[in-house]
Amino acid sequence: MHNINTRTLDLNLLVVFATLWETQNVTRASERLSLSQSAVSHALRRLRERLGDELFVIGRGGLVPTARAAELIGPVRDALSRLDDALQGSAPFVPAAVQRKFRIASGDFVEFLILPRLIQHIARQAPGVMIEVVPLPPKNAVSALLESGEIDLIISAPMTLGAVLRQEPITTVSLLTLIWQREGLPPGRFPLDLYLERPQVMIEMHQRDGNIIDQTLQAQGLARRIGVLVQNFMAMPVIASQTGYICNLPGPIAEAFAATFGLSCHEPPVDFPAPELVAYWHSRFDVDPGLQWLRDQVKSCAVQLP
């Protein structure tokens, strides 16, 4: 038995072998492969030497495969087919037919604003697709989780990350300031003196990462009072309704919860930049058609925000 190492075997010889099997003729094989007859004969000779078998012998109707050739043809065809499939790339992504789960890391802000619309889109277009939402990971774990594919997409406030990660702005959402309706504030801009004096409900991640509200106030030599830090946006209007504290929420969330919790919505006393949402993924999945489709759906849903 000959020791064959595929690392040193010219794979083109296997292509010639499979073509000779199909044509049973050196001339026809050379025409199909766009090679000279001598090149095909030379390839067959090399393969015979490597395998220690004639592979094909002359018969009445042309080349006749040996028992060893008959043993090899199935695995060789299968290997060449698999290689062709791999080199052709992924099959087209057909939303209506695909069965796939995507994992998105985001905060409750995104779950409230974008996820309901996203699920509606997916239910219509790709019923076999499942979305799993997981918590935002620590910044030092983002790159590894996206590279491994454990997380497909991260949607969050802007972050400074490595060059191997891709990013795309999704949307911006203006802030509104909420307070008890019983305060009787007139519609319009929130009074600056009350804004600076009254304690506020703040989400903890904004204290950790910095935020546009405090940065804007600091640039004007101002500072607000933080009365309580919470873990998610949904807790903010609940606490504000029971304490009289102020909270600042993205417009769609503020308007959805104001009446429920007896709060009134106002333009902030200072023009804060609208918070931005950004989608992040790893560069190794740039050409993944499924992930491209998912990003398009997320962006489309974000554009529809009120």
Image (cartoon, rainbow, N blue to C red):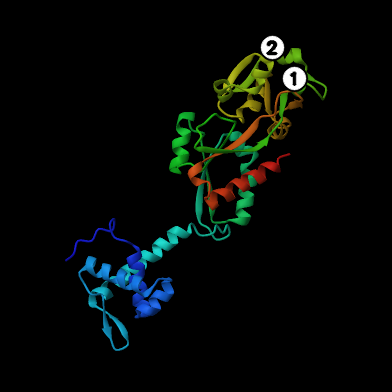
Amino acid type, callout 1 = Val
Quadrant in which the C terminus appears:
top right
**In this orientation, which residue lies closer to the viewer: 2 or 155?**
2
Q: Position of residue 99 (x, y in %)?
A: 51, 56
Question: Residue 37 is drawn in which quadrant?
Answer: bottom left
Q: Position of residue 122 (x, y in %)?
A: 60, 52
Query: Is 233 above or below relative to 306?
Result: above
- Residue, disc 2: 222
SS of the residue under disc 2 = loop
- The earlier-in-sequence mark between 1 and 2 is 2
Kindly identify which residue carries mark 1: 270
Other residues around mark 1 within 10 Å, as few (<14) / some (14–19) / many (≥20): some
Question: Residue 247, which numbered label?
Answer: none
From the viewer's perspective, is residue 127 above or below residue 253? below
Residue 8 visible here:
yes
Q: Is 95 left, or right, of 3 in this rendering?
A: right
Instruction: Residue 173 in the image: state x and y as whole percent.
Output: 69, 33
Secondary element at tag 1: loop
- Left or right for 4, reference 292: left
Query: Image point 29% across, 89% down: which residue?
Result: 60
266 relative to 41 in the view: left or right:
right
Tell whether label 2 touches label 1 (CB within 8 Å): yes
**Residue occupying image coordinates x 28% and y 71%:** 72
